[in-house]
Image: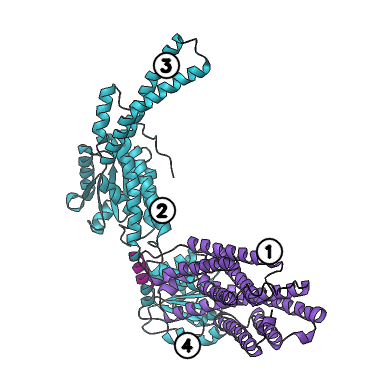
Chain colours: A purple, B cyan
Amino acid sequence: MLTELHLAALTFYALTGALVAVPLLRLPGGTVRGTPALVAAFAAVAVHFAALLAYARTTGALPLSGIAPAVSSLGFLVGLLAFLVLWLTRERAIALVAAPLVVVLLVAALSTGFGPTLSGVSPRGPWFVLHVGASLLGLALIAVAFAASALYLLQHRELKARRFGAVFQAFPPLEQLDRINYIALVLGFPTLTLGVVLGAGYVGLEVGIRQIGPAHLGVGLGAWVVLGAMAGLRLAGRLRGRRAALGAIAGFAVIAASYTTLVLLQHGFRRFL
Amino acid sequence: MGLTLIGLNHRSAPVEIRERLYWPVAEVPGVLQKLSGASGTHAVLLSTCNRTEFYLSENYPQALEVISRQASARLGQPLDPYAYVLQERDVAEHLFRVAAGMDSLVLGESQVQGQVREAWEAAQTSADPVLHRLFQSALRAGGRVRAETALGAGAASVPSASVELAHKIFGDLSGRKALVLGSGEMAELAMGLLISEGVRTAMVAHRHLEHAAQIAEKLGGRAVEYGEAWPMFAEVDIVVTSTAAPHAIVTGRQVSEAVARRGGRPLCILDIAVPRDVDPAVGRLDNVFLYDIDDLQGVVAANIGIRRREVPAAERIVQQELRHFWDWYTGRGAVDAIRQLRDHADGLRAVELERALRRLEHLDPADRERVEYLTRALMNKFLHGPTLALRAAAGNGNDRELADAVRRLFGLREAPTQPNQESTRQ
């Protein structure tokens, strides 16, 4: 049931991406208004939520512990935030980056598998739940900033090069993308900071420092430092536009790459999250 | 014959003919009243800079004569070489395409939808139910084409392309500040559109301060000389240039310092002058987006290309709406005849039922109800065949003859016309 619901959500995310990509293919009569993409995105988020709910009911624990549930939760948060952007701005291009990103996360979660870890899931304390929840939300906000930044750079390139094709037509205005990037970073930093603080509480009170691997510490603190630097520069008005977009993409890439590298080196990734 | 159209448009007549045959909206009711008085016909007059067309619900021969005579008198020459006449389904198809912007000089332009609506509103007293329905359906077709396709997407003129480019950089333009360098009709048009989107004119710079003051007063800005304009590149969001200078007057050296003080905020420069006013090197500065007249025309060309690709989708919508209208139009005679036939039969049934029930006073209420049910069932059975035949005839366009035959057979009178019976607005 968990797998089927995740596959259904994955299909809806892929459909959302496809619906948004149709105008870019410039087919005759290929113009699709925002509504079908919005409906598909809503269906994807709703089914994904149902999948996570089913996990919680089956295991009696929140989907935060273990690779597959945590990655799926991260995907859900990214999907939810992208849906909110789509809904509030009526600019559907954000789905061009967010939808494939969530699809990749869901594929990763499904390939890791929910089944074998079910019996191993044990309920954890509130420190853990809040720590992982806040951290995942912070990471999801960075992912949204990444999506907006990717679109910003593409649209910026088209505008600078004076190309008025499909990207120019379909992508949102530069300032709007910059604003999404700004909001995601400014909200993401305090959220991730909260995650780090709660993580310290979790380590101090529940597991002890020796139980935490370098991947966990490295990625958590690394993400916090990168996001903090960017949020600080943005709040101070020293970073905006193209440089802010490059910064957000670099930050996201650093976090993703360091996490993957450390997990692979550590061989003990089951303990992570 | 029913629906008829006589008119001319941008394809059949040059502008000097069209402009002489243009009636402002305020004059339209008078023209239609005169036409109705002379020929007794119901009509709607659609008069724009690109077309003048009379839509008639019935083809009274004298109506066409009257229109032709009046138009020829106004033109000072015969109308015939420029005019076209369409009839029945072609009239509806033509109007649907007009309302959708598919028959416009600029494909997909949206203004014509409002003009069709104005023409219809100006003919509230001179149009009959057929014309009301025709225009309602045309407006619905036009609305659907705009909502469901990209036929009207993007800018289709250089001034509106300026606005589109500014939108793509800033999104909402309200509160943005603009600087105008020089004068020129195109620049003023572009600025007019930008101001209508909420842009504030901060400053107008011109070689002659007096001229700058005139433009500044018109656009609501402050007049300065060129030399004072360069520092403003640090503050404004949009710069529109249109000077008569023979060489570039805005160079990287002049504005790079001001641009560096912008803190990464984008600057949109629209150079509408020929020869160009802005050195292309300015466009290479960080966060500066420079567009010249060729770029603006490129935006227009790209949008027209998109609009052309949407024509088949728009055509499908027009044909769908046309089918709906045509079903209604051809079925009108049948609907009246069916209603009259049923009313007639029901009246007879009611009289005979009452007479019969007076003789059957011993029946209890349940049995009386059964008898009444029997009479209704019999009536429906008898009328089923003729009703189907009338509907089928309406579908084939032969309903009028059959409706007349039914009326003669059953002794029915033709239903009187009620002019504003179906004039409910969308």
Which residue does the image show at 50% across and 10% down from the upper left? B362
Residue, disc 1: A57
Viewer-proximal residue, B102 or A103? A103
What SS does tag 2 mark? Answer: helix
Q: CA distance from mark 4 to mark 3?
A: 98 Å
What SS does tag 1 mark? Answer: helix
Question: Do the residues at pointers 2 and 4 share their chain?
Answer: yes
How crowded pointer 3 is (Cα within 10 Å; few <14, some 14-19, many 20+) is rated as some
Q: Are marks 2 and 4 in contact (CB under 8 Å)?
A: no
Which residue does the image show at 68% across and 78% down from the upper left? A189
Q: Are marks 2 and 1 in contact (CB under 8 Å)?
A: no
Residue A225 seen: yes
- Tally the numbered discs: 4
Q: Are marks 1 and 3 in contact (CB under 8 Å)?
A: no
Q: Position of residue B340 (x, y in %)?
A: 34, 27
Residue, disc 3: B353
**Chain where mark 4 sits:** B
How crowded pointer 1 is (Cα within 10 Å; few <14, some 14-19, many 20+) is rated as few
Q: Amino acid at mark 3?
A: Leu
Q: CA distance from mark 1 to mark 3?
A: 68 Å
Which residue does the image show at 34% across and 33% down from the upper left? B335
Q: Amino acid at mark 1?
A: Arg
- Foreground mark, 2 or 1, reads 1
**Chain where mark 2 sits:** B
Residue, disc 4: B252
- Foreground mark, 1 or 3, reads 1
Q: Position of residue B96 (x, y in %)?
A: 33, 51
Q: Position of residue A86 (x, y in %)?
A: 55, 66
Question: Do the residues at pointers 3 and 2 share their chain?
Answer: yes
Q: Amino acid at mark 4?
A: Gly
